[in-house]
């Protein structure tokens, strides 16, 4: 690592590598559990977001923004979930041009059957962490996400130019 940095401090790069490794660990565990039940990790994320949302549903655009992915990606995931009977589309009564996605009773039941095995798996991954450590880890991860949003805003100036930090 020192050779790569030219002798500069390697701590940020080492932390980045550790975060990447932790991310892959969690994603492998999550997606293994979801795929074993017929859903990709992305579809699972959408289903969870819909279960926590309004009973009326959530627009594709809002789901995409919340998940940090494109509307096209979410449309494909909703198509899959709808085909499986876990999600349905409904008209948006506030905007006739918009369609909402909402979880079905079958989707709620699917999540209920997934919840306990998921909780057991996460407890195993985070074994030995104190509540204070988990709180701090959550806080630090959210700070990373906030920093990324700040960098994106800086790099994508409203006038269409790209800046460099």
Image: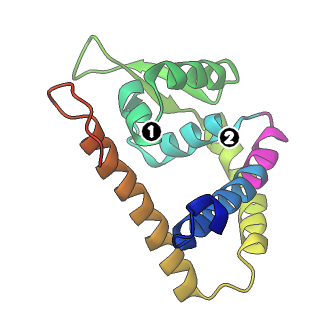
Relative depth, front residue between 78 and 2: 2
Residue annotated with mark 2: 41
Using the rendered image of the protein, determine whether residue 1 is visible from the camera's viewpoint: no
The nearer-to-camera label among 2 and 1 is 1
Residue 89 placement (x, y as % from top left): 48, 20
Separation of residues labelled 2 and 1 (CA atoms): 14 Å
Kindly identify the residue that appears in the image at 41 percent across and 44 percent down: 53
Front-lying residue, 14 or 115? 14
In the foreground, 117 or 143? 143
Which quadrant, please, contains the N terminus?
Answer: bottom right
Q: Position of residue 92 (x, y in %)?
A: 31, 21
Quadrant of residue 127 in the image? bottom right
Q: Tell me, what colour scheme is on the image?
A: rainbow
**Nearer to the camera, 50 or 148:** 148
Earlier residue among tags 2 and 1: 2
Q: Which residue does the image show at 58% across and 42% down from the upper left? A: 45
Residue at (61, 43) in percent of width and height: 108
The 10 Å Cα crowd at callout 1, few under 14, some 14 to 19, many 20 or more, is few
Q: Which residues are magenta?
A: 29-38
Query: Which residue, as the protein is rendered here, is positioned at the far right?
Result: 36
Residue 68, numbered circle = 1
Question: Was residue 21 drawn as part of the magenta stretch in this picture?
Answer: no
Is residue 94 something one can see in this rendering?
yes
Dot 2 alpha-carbon crowd within 10 angstroms: few under 14, some 14 to 19, many 20 or more? some
Locate residue 126, reporting x and y percent.
71, 75
Q: Which quadrant of the structure image shows residue 93?
A: top left
């Amino acid at each position: 690592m020192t050779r790569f940095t030219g002798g500069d401090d390697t701590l940020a790069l080492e932390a980045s590598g550790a975060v990447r490794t932790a991310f892959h660990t969690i994603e492998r565990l999550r997606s293994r559990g979801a795929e074993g039940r017929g859903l990709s990790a992305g579809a699972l994320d959408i289903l969870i977001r819909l279960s926590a949302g309004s009973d009326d549903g959530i627009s594709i655009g809002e789901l995409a923004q919340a998940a940090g992915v494109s509307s096209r990606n979410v449309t494909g995931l909703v198509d899959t979930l709808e085909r499986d009977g876990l999600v349905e589309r409904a008209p948006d009564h506030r905007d006739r041009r918009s369609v909402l996605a909402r979880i079905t009773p079958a989707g709620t039941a699917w999540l209920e059957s997934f919840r306990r095995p998921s909780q057991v798996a996460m407890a195993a991954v985070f074994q030995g962490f104190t509540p204070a450590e988990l709180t701090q880890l959550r806080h630090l991860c959210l700070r990373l996400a906030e920093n990324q949003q700040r960098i994106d805003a800086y790099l994508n100036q409203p006038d269409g130019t790209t800046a460099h930090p």
